[in-house]
Image: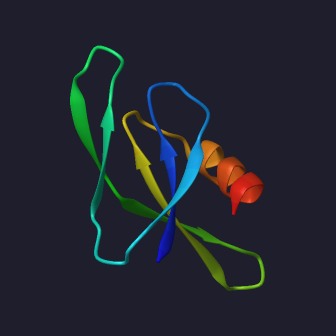
């Protein structure tokens, strides 16, 4: 299983667990439209030389700061 931070429809981010082979997450908008959100990976290097990989799915463009803030709070 892997944890994915989902940013959807301007709602607060949430973390869900999915099996390793899953590549997208389905969500429904309030008007009934359905969307498949691709799961992406974001890497954040640290000063010690290691890096942190975060899996995300979103229906909007995110900044690296938004992703890192959510990861620090939720993971």
Q: Is residue 5 above or below residue 54?
A: above
Residue 15 image position (x, y, % from top left)? 57, 54
Q: In the picture provided, is 44 more to the left or to the right than 74?
A: left
Outermost residue, bottom side? 49
Total marks placed: 0
Picture quadrant where residue 58 is located: top left
Q: In the picture provided, is 73 more to the left or to the right than 60?
A: right
Identified at 58% across, 46% down, the residue is 14
Identified at 61% across, 33% down, the residue is 12
Q: In the picture provided, is 12 more to the left or to the right than 23?
A: right
Identified at 27% across, 64% down, the residue is 23
Image quarter hosting the C terminus: bottom right
Residue 30 image position (x, y, % from top left)? 36, 17
Identified at 41% across, 50% down, the residue is 57
Residue 10 image position (x, y, % from top left)? 52, 25
The structure's colour scheme is: rainbow
The foreground one among 54 and 32 is 32
The foreground one among 55 and 61 is 55
């Amino acid at each position: 299983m892997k944890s994915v931070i989902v940013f959807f429809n301007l709602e607060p981010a949430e973390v869900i667990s999915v099996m390793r082979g899953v590549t997208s997450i389905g969500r429904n908008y309030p008007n009934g439209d359905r969307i498949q959100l691709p799961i992406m990976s974001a890497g954040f290097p640290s000063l010690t030389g290691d890096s942190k990989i975060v899996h995300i799915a979103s229906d909007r463009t995110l900044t690296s700061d938004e992703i890192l803030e959510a990861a620090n709070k939720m993971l």
